[in-house]
Image (cartoon, grey):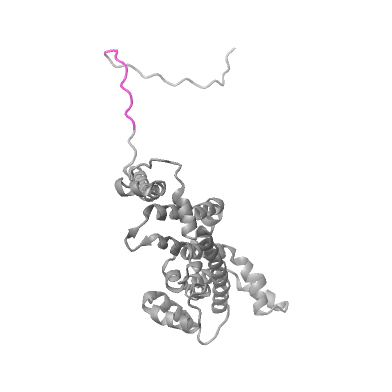
Amino acid sequence: MTSDLAAPAAPARRADAAGRPPAPRPRRRPPVGTVLTYLSLLVATAVVLLPLGVVFLTSLKTSREVAEGGALSLPGNWLNLDNYVTAFDDGHMLAAFGNTAFILFFSIGGTVVIGSMTAYAVDRFDFPARKTVMALFLIATLVPSVTTQVATFQIVNGLGLVDTRWAPILLYMGTDIVSVYIFLQFIRGIPVSLDEAARLDGAGAFTIYRKIIFPLLKPAIATVVIIKGITIYNDFYTPFLYLHSEDLGTISTALFRFKGPFGAHWEAISAGAILVILPTLVVFLLLQRWIYNGFAQGATK
C-alpha cells in the first residue's frame, strides 16, 4: 500500500506542438560584481605570491644560473642548499635573530607599559595641560620622522647609546604615538564605575591600573604587539643607522652584507630572505586566530 504522504513527482516538461522536446533552460550568468571580486582576488594573489616564488627559485640557483637565466627560470638542482648555508654562516643569521628577538622583547614590552599608562593618565585624570598633551600627540604624528633624524641622532650619541642595542629600543618605545591612541580608545570603553568602586575599597591609581585597567586591555595589547612587532621586524633604517658593529646586526641589516661594491649576490640574499620569512610564517600560522581577533576587536573601538 502506498503512503499518502509521498512527495508529489516533479511535473514533466511538455513538448511543443511539433512533438520536439523543450529546449534546456539557459544557465544564469554570475553577476558582474562577483566576477570582478574573484578577478581582483586572483590578481592580488599573483602580486603577492609571484615575488615570493621568484625569491624561492633564486635561492636554489647557482651564481651562473642567476646571471644567465631569467627570474622565473627553474634551478638545475632543486636540492641545492649551498646558498642557505652561505646566508646562515656568512650573514651571521643566528646572531641577527638573537639581536632582533632582544630588541623586539624590550621594545614591545616598553611600548605596552608606557602606552597603556599614558592612555590611562590622559583619560582618567583631569589636569590643566590635558588638552595640550593631546594636541602635542597629534602634532607628533603629523611631523615627518625624517626631519628630526639629525637631532635624534645627536641626542642618542650624546647619551652614549650609538652602536648599542638600547638605541633602537629607546627609539621604538618613545616614538609610538599610534599605540597610545589604540590604548586610549579601549580605555574609554571601560566604565568609570569600576574605578570608583575600587577607590571605595581603598585602591590607589596604580592599583586600579594594575588590577582593573591593564587586564581589560588584552585585545588592545594584542593589536599593539602585532602592529609594533611587524614594524620592528621589518625596519631597516634604524638598525642600519645606530648599530654599526657586525655582531649587533639585525635580520634586516644582515641581508645587506651580501651586497658588495661590484654587485649583489642575489642567490645568497634570496636564501637569507627565505630564512627571514620562515619565522614570521610559522608565527602567523600558529597565532592567526589571535591576530585576526586583535585586528577585528581593535577596529570596532
**Up-down relation of residue 66 to residue 183 (above or below):** above
Nearest the viewer among 227 and 237 is 237
At x 63%, y 74%, the residue is 209
**Residue 152 in which image quadrant:** bottom left
Whether residue 301 can be seen here: no
- Between 186 and 248, the one nearer to me in the picture: 248
Comparing 282 with 292, the one in front is 282
Using the image as rendered, state which of residue 77 and residue 104 is in the foreground. Answer: 77
Residue 149 in the image, given as x and y percentages of width and height: 40, 78
Whether residue 279 is visible to the viewer of this picture, yes or no, is yes
Residue 57 located left or right of residue 168: left
- Asked if the stretch drawn in magenta spans residue 121, the answer is no
Magenta portion: prevailing SS class: loop
Determine the residue located farthest toward the left in the rendered image. 18
Q: How many marks?
A: 0
Furthest toward the bottom, the residue is 128
Give the x, y percent position of residue 121: 57, 79
Is residue 275 left or right of 187 when viewed as pictured? Answer: left
Where does residue 247 sit, x and y in percent of width and height? 51, 67
Q: Residue at x 52, y 87 (%)?
A: 128
Q: Residue furthest right?
A: 201
Q: Position of residue 77 (x, y in %)?
A: 41, 41
Q: Quadrant of the N terminus?
A: top right
178 relative to 73, above or below = below
Is residue 26 rendered magenta in the image? yes
Residue bounds of the magenta highlight: 18-27
